[in-house]
Image (cartoon, rainbow, N blue to C red):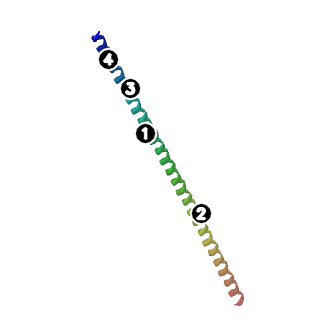
């Protein structure tokens, strides 16, 4: 009878410890999954930030191109105006002489 009680107690203890071990393993797995999810979210956030920076950089480049184009147009217009003025002056000189 004592042997049966000891065996039952040992079996119960072993079963309880096995369940505790399984619970610990499940908790570890859950923690690892949560960490992986957090890392993925951080990675996505970093990618989004990089994309935003790229877009901002592209927008800045476009603005710079537009500015340069405007400046070039202005210079061309100014040059044309100057040339026209010079021609007019030349014409006036020819008429006088």
- Would you place residue 90 above or below residue 56 in this image? below
Q: Which of disc 4 and disc 3 is earlier in sequence?
A: 4
- In this rendering, the answer to whether 21 lies above or below 74 is above
Q: Sequence order check: which comes first, mark 3 or mark 2?
A: 3
Mark found first going from the N terminus, 1 or 2: 1
Circle number at residue 66: 2
Decide: marks 1, 4 in contact (CB < 8 A)?
A: no
Say whether marks 1 and 2 touch (CB < 8 Å): no
Q: Which residue is mark 3?
A: 22
Q: Given this view, does label 1 or label 4 mark the residue nearer the observer?
A: 4
Q: Position of residue 15 (x, y in %)?
A: 35, 20
Q: Quadrant of residue 28?
A: top left
Label number found at residue 9: 4
Q: Position of residue 73 (x, y in %)?
A: 62, 69
| Distance from the alpha carbon under mark 1 to that under mark 3 | 20 Å
In three-dimensional space, the C-alpha distance between marks 3 and 2, rounded to whole angstroms, equals 65 Å
Q: Secondary structure at mark 1?
A: helix
Q: Secondary structure at mark 2?
A: helix
Please report the residue visible at 29 percent of the width from the left and 15 percent of the height from the top.
6
Q: Which residue is mark 1?
A: 35
Vertical comparison of 79 with 44: above or below: below
Residue, x 30% and y 11% (percent of image)? 4
Q: Quadrant of the C terminus?
A: bottom right
């Amino acid at each position: 009878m004592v042997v049966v009680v000891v065996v039952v107690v040992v079996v119960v203890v072993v079963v309880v410890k096995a369940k505790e071990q399984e619970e610990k393993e499940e908790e570890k797995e859950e923690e690892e999954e949560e960490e992986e999810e957090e890392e993925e979210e951080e990675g996505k956030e970093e990618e989004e930030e990089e994309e935003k920076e790229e877009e901002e950089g592209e927008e800045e480049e476009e603005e710079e191109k537009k500015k340069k184009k405007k400046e070039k147009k202005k210079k061309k217009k100014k040059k044309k105006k100057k040339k026209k003025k010079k021609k007019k002056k030349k014409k006036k000189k020819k008429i006088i002489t």
